[in-house]
């Protein structure tokens, strides 16, 4: 029978759940099934003290506080994601390793019995034995605040189940993303312009904009997500867990940030939510990595947006960089070409198709929301552009797109007279199929089928 708490025990549990165990009290140990809650005093601490941040974890009703080793270029910090479960290796109050745990069974509860539950796992059904010791907790992530509470199960809940001797010992109610397959795909390592553009479309519709997204935790370069072949599961998880009210940055009516402690914005020059979404330079860096490589974990291409185009041309020798060009008046005779990468002060994007100047990018809304759009402008003289042109079948360019934190794109509908981060009044989320169809049509007209 599933665990039911009497009033006295519930009161005792509430007291226990508030207990905090400082690092010094732990000594050296291994800690299993610890939920990562985040950094103490998030929103106020800055990168200058990042080596001594206090990281908080939840374990069976107790909050554990540790520092995290900065070894191997902050390898552990670049693994931790809020609201996820980890097995930790702790030495003298410092976490030296963290391995994400997904449970023995993960899926949707379809039936609840006296001594078992039925869980649908991607189309298959599995019976999980339970008893009076089976503990049930709910994990509720939010910007700057992850909570874990004792809970009960209902049909329709998504869960991760951990078993001992084939019986559930812990059941965690938590968000599980639905399987996702991008409607347009590139081929890793195929260095053609067509493949670069197809690759750049993969995250469209399943990634959100976060400033610093796909940069590493310490804000120095590429995250693990930036050098992952394919769409990172963390992007899919975060995108599907949000709704139309999503905002990466809490702001007042004057556009000023008001609440860093409950915002995904990386105040303090470090990226707690590096894993959750993509910004412009992270997007372009990821698209390039997936075009130039066939395996994950290599050297990435994420860097400051302003210098990306020039670096790709002069350091990587992928193409030609110029600041001299004629403003386009139409497709014929334009200095701009499909696949060009444009950098200006603080932004970078990819030109996916003619005519005029258009952009495949991810940009924030003025209210802190997000949109990924396909933009047209005839007033391109207002751009300080750095243009990389590909004249061969090999991809000599790849532009760092500013933020494909991908919502969906209506490329034939969205029009700006000049670059702007103003709110356009468009819906914050577009249907994936509509955007994908529009983008696929544009690619088909230019190159033929993108597949």
Image (tube, rainbow, N blue to C red):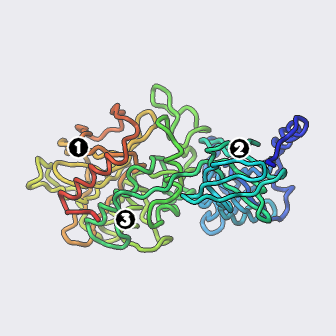
Of 80 and 119, the residue lying toward us: 119
Q: Is residue 25 left or right of residue 385?
A: right
Q: Is residue 170 above or below residue 416?
A: below
* Image mark count: 3
Residue visible at 12% across and 54% down in the picture: 334
Looking at the picture, how far across and down is residue 4, in whole percent?
83, 42
Which residue is labeled 1 in the image?
Answer: 412
Q: Is residue 429 above or below residue 91?
A: above
Q: Is residue 371 visible?
A: yes
Question: In front of the other: label 1 or label 3?
Answer: 1
Of 238 and 302, the residue lying toward us: 238
Residue visible at 23% across and 53% down in the picture: 441
Label 2 vs label 1: CA separation? 46 Å
Which residue is labeled 2 in the image?
Answer: 153
Q: Secondary structure at mark 3?
A: helix
Which residue is labeled 3 in the image?
Answer: 288
Q: Is residue 89 above or below residue 179?
A: below
Looking at the picture, how far across and down is residue 327, in whole percent?
15, 49
Q: Is residue 5 left or right of residue 365?
A: right
Residue visible at 73% across and 46% down in the picture: 137
């Amino acid at each position: 029978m599933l665990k039911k708490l009497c009033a006295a025990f519930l009161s005792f549990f509430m007291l226990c759940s508030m207990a905090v165990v400082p690092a010094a009290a732990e000594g050296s140990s291994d800690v299993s099934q610890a939920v990562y809650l985040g950094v103490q005093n998030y929103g106020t601490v800055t990168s200058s003290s990042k080596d001594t941040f206090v990281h908080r974890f939840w374990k069976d009703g107790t909050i554990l506080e540790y520092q995290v080793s900065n070894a191997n270029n902050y390898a552990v910090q670049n693994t931790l994601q809020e609201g996820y479960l980890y097995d930790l290796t702790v030495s003298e109050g410092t976490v030296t390793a963290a391995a994400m745990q997904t449970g023995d069974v993960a899926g949707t509860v379809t039936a609840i019995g006296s001594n078992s539950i039925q869980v649908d796992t991607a189309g298959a059904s599995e019976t999980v034995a339970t008893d009076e010791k089976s503990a049930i907790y709910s994990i509720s992530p939010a910007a700057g605040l992850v909570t874990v509470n004792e809970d009960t199960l209902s049909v329709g809940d998504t869960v991760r189940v951990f078993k001992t001797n084939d019986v559930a010992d812990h059941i965690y109610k938590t968000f599980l993303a639905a399987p996702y397959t991008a409607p347009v795909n590139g081929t890793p390592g195929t260095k053609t312009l067509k493949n670069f553009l197809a690759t750049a479309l993969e995250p469209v519709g399943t990634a959100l904009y976060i400033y610093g997204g796909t940069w590493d935790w310490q804000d120095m370069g590429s995250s693990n997500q930036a050098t992952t072949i394919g769409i990172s599961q963390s992007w899919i998880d975060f995108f599907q867990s949000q709704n139309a009210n999503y905002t990466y940055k809490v702001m007042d009516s004057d556009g000023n940030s008001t609440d860093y402690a409950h915002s995904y914005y990386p105040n303090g020059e470090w990226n707690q939510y590096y894993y959750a979404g993509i910004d412009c330079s992270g997007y372009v860096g990821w698209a390039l990595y997936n075009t130039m490589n066939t395996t994950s974990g290599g050297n990435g291409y994420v860097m400051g947006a302003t210098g990306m185009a020039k670096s790709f041309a002069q350091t990587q020798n992928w193409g030609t960089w110029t600041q001299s060009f004629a403003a386009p008046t139409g497709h014929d005779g334009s200095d701009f070409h499909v696949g060009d990468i444009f950098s200006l002060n603080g932004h970078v994007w990819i030109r996916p198709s003619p005519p005029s100047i258009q952009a495949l990018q991810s940009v924030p809304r003025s209210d802190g929301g997000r949109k990924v759009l396909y933009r047209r402008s005839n007033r391109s003289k207002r751009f300080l552009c750095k243009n990389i042109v590909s004249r061969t079948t090999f991809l000599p360019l790849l532009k760092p797109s500013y933020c494909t934190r991908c919502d969906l794109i209506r490329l034939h509908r969205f029009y700006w007279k000049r670059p702007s981060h103003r709110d356009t009044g468009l819906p914050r989320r577009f249907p994936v199929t509509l955007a994908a169809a529009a983008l696929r049509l544009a690619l088909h007209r230019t190159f033929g089928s993108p597949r």
